[in-house]
Image: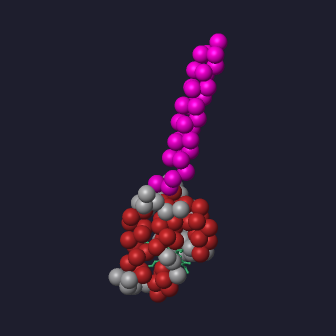
Amino acid sequence: MSRWVGSISRTAFILGGIFAAATVLANSPAPAKGDRELGEHLSSMCTACHQISGRMSGGIPAIVAWPDEQFIAVIQSYKDGTRDNETMRTISHRLSQEDIEALASYFGSLPAPKAP
Ligand code: HEC
């Protein structure tokens, strides 16, 4: 009888350990990925011009569904002047590296529109 109880509590202990490990894993952010929630928050700065639907509008290009690295590289090129655009230069200068990664993660997660 007491051996029974012992093996149950041992099993519970092991399962508890697995849960704890899984929780730690689930909560640690994936490396080199921006904070999507922060990106969603910051995106209000962008969506006055860029359509959230991913459609081009009034000559303003679509920016959804891009790979993170590409998005980050483009914002950086506005920041360092490789790409010359007054509007985007001003905006990119307000963004920290963390902001840019967060925006890349958020906009990258939005689906591209289907062809009309
Ligand atoms: C006032 C309007 C406006 C706002 C606000 C704005 N953009 Fe832009 N954005 C533009 C225009 C216009 C272009 C095209 C510039 C060019 O020709 O290089 C552009 C270009 C871009 C591009 C490159 C698109 C491509 O196809 O090459 C990215 C990426 C981008 N914007 C991201 C953002 C992000 C992220 C924000 C918010 C932090 C933002 N923009 C806010 C007007 C805006």
The answer to if 22 sits in the magenta stretch is yes
The answer to if 66 sits in the magenta stretch is no
Query: Residue at image x 55%, y 51%?
Result: 27
Q: Where does the image place residue 83, in percent across and percent down from the top left?
A: 37, 81
By secondary structure, the bulk of the magenta-drawn segment is best described as: helix
- Colour scheme of the rendered structure: secondary structure
In the image, is residue 91 above or below residue 38?
A: below
Residue 100 in view: yes
Q: Residue furthest left?
A: 82
Of the pair 15 and 68, the residue shown nearer to us: 15
Q: Which residues are magenta?
A: 1-30
Number of numbered tags placed on the structure image: 0
In the image, is residue 78 above or below residue 109?
A: below
Of the pair 46 and 40, the residue shown nearer to us: 40
Query: Residue at image x 53%, y 47%?
Result: 24
In the image, is residue 113 above or below residue 58?
A: above
Quadrant into which the N terminus falls: top right
Residue 26 placement, left or right of 66: right
Query: Residue at image x 62%, y 67%?
Result: 41
Q: Where does the image place residue 62, in percent across and percent down from the top left?
A: 49, 67
Q: Residue furthest front?
A: 2
Residue 71: image quadrant is bottom left
Query: Residue at image x 61%, y 26%?
Result: 9
Residue 115 in view: no
